[in-house]
Amino acid sequence: MIAPTSIQRKGHSTLAVSWNDGVDSEYDVRQLRLNCPCAACVNEWTGEKMLDSGKVPEDIRPIRLFSVGRYAMGIEWSDGHTTGIFAYDYLRRLSGKPSVTESLTG
Ligand SMILES: [Zn+2]
């Protein structure tokens, strides 16, 4: 199963993730915030984005990172949003670098 071996803040706006298959990804933290998959940001039924990107501050920062079980990471944001849970496979897909198993199965 795909999982990070390390997650580090790099500068003010970048999150660097090293994965257990040897791939390193870097994320712009605001892009992560905009892609928050929680029910407050994305309509659970339609998949429609509820989040108004204009309301996410340009200088949004993760305040706290926490692991959720073995499959996901939660982020507390400087705009007060705390319900965002990023499953590792979702996080990996956001990086644009599919994991080996995903690329094999298409
Ligand atoms: Zn959210």
Image (cartoon, rainbow, N blue to C red):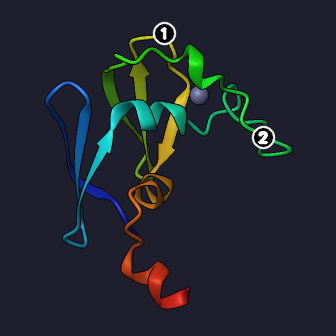
71 relative to 66 in the view: left or right:
right
Task: Say which residue appears at 48% left-offset and 79% top-offset.
Answer: 102
68 relative to 39 in the view: left or right:
left
Task: Say which residue appears at 50% left-offset and 55% top-offset.
Answer: 90
Badge 2 amino acid: Glu
Residue at the spot of label 1 = 80
Kindly check if marks 1 and 2 are in contact, taking CB atoms under 8 A apart as contact. Answer: no
Q: Can residue 74 be seen in this view?
A: no
Question: Residue 16, percent across and down?
Answer: 21, 45
> In the image, which disc is placed on residue 2?
none
Instruction: Give the mark nearest the N terminus, 1 or 2.
Output: 2
Task: Say which residue appears at 85% left-offset and 45% top-offset.
Answer: 46
Dot 2 alpha-carbon crowd within 10 angstroms: few under 14, some 14 to 19, many 20 or more: few
Q: Is residue 46 visible?
A: yes
Secondary structure of residue under mark 1: loop
Q: Is the N terminus in the top left, top right, bottom left or bottom right quadrant?
A: bottom left
Secondary structure of residue under mark 2: loop
Residue at the spot of label 2 = 48
Disc 1 versus disc 2: distance between alpha carbons?
A: 22 Å
Say above or below: 3 vs 97.
above
69 relative to 106 in the view: left or right:
left
| Viewer-side residue, 20 vs 45 | 45
Say above or below: 93 vs 33.
below
